[in-house]
């Protein structure tokens, strides 16, 4: 194959075929970096930004039509909106924050639906790219979550009490504190936001790469020969992975929102 | 699949500043609209709906209780009415019987009275007739006897005694016959 690659100067993913002398155009990290659609100075408007804004618009428009003029007897889109609201409230919010945590519902709902719609773009035909696989978006949301739960912790447990409770969990024997305290502080203040953002980004990135592998494979192997069989197999796997990714998009949004709710509840309870 | 030339900038863990700012901005937009406008509206409606459903259930329960109460009342009234009716019937029957008894009593008393009056009248008539007869029988008998014996019993005293004796005999005769 290396010899083939050497001669294939003209090869692009569009033209590469199994018997054309071009190698398989494996997806790379470069597939997550786009030329800007337009530029204003150093401001670069790229495809992920466009998709992210479209996702935000979809969430806003959907809930505007669902809850803008709510009726006592719900009809149509309001039913769907209420279904979403009750799912977030009863499956994500209340298990951690209880009924008194309903004041965080707008926050958790915004997180869940914004992330979920961005994730869904991974498998929407014609879009096929999840903005959440760009680290900036999960990172930005994580910073907001981090500021929220640290702020709430300081407000509810006091600026010293919060960090003291965090470093020395109740029930821990005194002799272990020198070891435990740095781990706890490190874990709560740095590991948590890092894993929260990277988990989402990495899952969506991996999902997108996986879909690319089989989409490109289907195209690369497509040939009116025995390779047609390989191409069909690749297509079948691609469809299965798409089904899997439907679950992943939902699951990752769910995990992000659930952990946000959990971190907030952790900050509200002074007795850790 | 446009690959940017310099792979040095292609670190997936380095956030793009533009994306970061715009992403956060978009999130705050969604959060603001949901928190300030849309969720208060839907929460109000959800609360109202819960109230309406609970209120409706409560109203239905109240209505049912009311219906039950009215039914009980109606049944009690019906039972009372039946009892009253049977009581009235009984009373009427008793009154009827009493009236009939009274009437019968009155009628028999009247009948007795009438019979009594008739008896008295007959007795009086008889006594009167007897009295009349006594006077007439005396003179008739004297006349007859005078004529028969051809001797005038002019002596008043003798005449009277004879008549008295005759009459006494006459009175005793029917009594003896009655025995």
Image (spheres, rainbow, N blue to C red):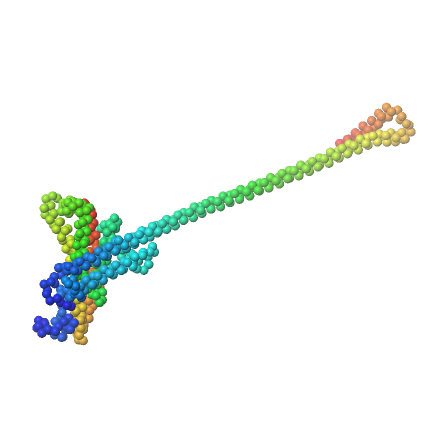
| Residue at the far front in the pictured view | A41
Rendering quarter of residue A200: bottom left
Coordinates of residue B49 in the picture (x, y in percent): 33, 52
**Position of A66 relative to A166 (above/below):** below
Quarter the N terminus of chain A occupies: bottom left
Coordinates of residue B29 in the picture (x, y in percent): 23, 57
Q: Is residue A135 something that shows in the picture? A: no
Q: For the point 12% across and 47% down, which residue is it?
A: A181
Q: For the point 62% across and 38% down, which residue is it?
A: B102
Coordinates of residue B127 in the picture (x, y in percent): 77, 32
Judge left or right: residue B5 versus residue B68. Answer: left
Q: For the point 19% across and 46% down, which residue is it?
A: A156
Is residue A243 or residue A157 the one in the foreground?
Answer: A157
- Give the mark count: 0
Q: For the point 12% across and 44% down, which residue is it?
A: A173
Judge left or right: residue B117 versus residue B28. Answer: right
**Position of A75 relative to A182 (above/below):** below
Rendering quarter of residue B100: top right
Q: Is residue B155 something that shows in the picture? A: yes
């Amino acid at each position: 194959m290396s010899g083939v690659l050497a001669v294939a100067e003209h090869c692009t993913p569009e033209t590469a075929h199994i018997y054309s002398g071009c190698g398989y155009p494996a997806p790379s990290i470069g597939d997550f970096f786009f030329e800007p659609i337009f530029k204003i100075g150093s401001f670069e408007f790229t495809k992920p930004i466009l998709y992210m804004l479209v996702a935000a618009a979809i969430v806003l428009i959907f809930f505007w039509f669902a809850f803008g003029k709510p009726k006592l007897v719900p009809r149509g889109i309001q039913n769907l909106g209420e279904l979403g609201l009750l799912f977030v409230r009863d499956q994500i919010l209340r298990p951690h924050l209880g009924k008194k945590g309903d004041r965080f519902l707008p926050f958790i709902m915004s997180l869940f639906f914004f992330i979920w719609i961005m994730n869904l773009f991974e498998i929407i035909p014609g879009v096929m790219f999840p903005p959440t696989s760009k680290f900036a978006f999960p990172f930005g949301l994580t910073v907001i979550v981090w500021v929220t739960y640290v702020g709430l912790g300081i407000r509810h447990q006091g600026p010293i009490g919060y960090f003291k409770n965090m470093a020395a969990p109740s029930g821990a024997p005194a002799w272990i504190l020198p070891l435990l305290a740095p781990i706890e502080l490190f874990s709560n203040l740095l590991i948590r936001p890092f894993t929260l953002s990277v988990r989402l980004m990495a899952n969506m990135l991996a999902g997108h790469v996986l879909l690319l592998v089989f989409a490109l494979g289907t195209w690369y192997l497509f040939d009116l020969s025995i390779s047609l069989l390989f191409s069909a197999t690749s297509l079948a796997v691609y469809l299965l992975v798409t089904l899997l990714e439907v679950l992943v998009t939902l699951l990752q949004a769910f995990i992000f929102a659930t952990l946000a709710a959990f971190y907030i509840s952790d900050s509200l309870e002074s007795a850790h | 699949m446009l690959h940017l030339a310099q792979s040095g900038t292609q670190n997936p863990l380095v956030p793009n500043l533009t994306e970061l700012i715009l992403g956060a901005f978009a999130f705050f937009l969604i959060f603001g609209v949901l928190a300030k406008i849309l969720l208060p509206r839907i929460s109000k409606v959800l609360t109202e709906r819960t109230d309406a459903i609970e209120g409706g259930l409560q109203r239905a329960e109240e209505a049912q209780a009311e219906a039950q109460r009215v039914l009980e009342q109606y049944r009690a009234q019906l039972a009372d009415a039946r009892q009253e009716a049977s009581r009235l019937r009984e009373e009427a029957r008793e009154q009827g019987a009493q009236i009939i008894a009274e009437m019968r009593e009155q009628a028999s008393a009247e009948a007795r009275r009438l019979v009594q009056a008739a008896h008295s009248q007959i007795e009086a008539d008889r006594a009167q007739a007897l009295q009349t007869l006594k006077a007439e029988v005396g003179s008739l008998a004297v006349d007859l006897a005078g004529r028969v014996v051809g001797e005038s019993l002019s002596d008043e005293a003798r005449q009277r005694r004879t008549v008295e004796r005759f009459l006494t005999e006459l009175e005793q005769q029917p009594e003896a016959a009655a025995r």
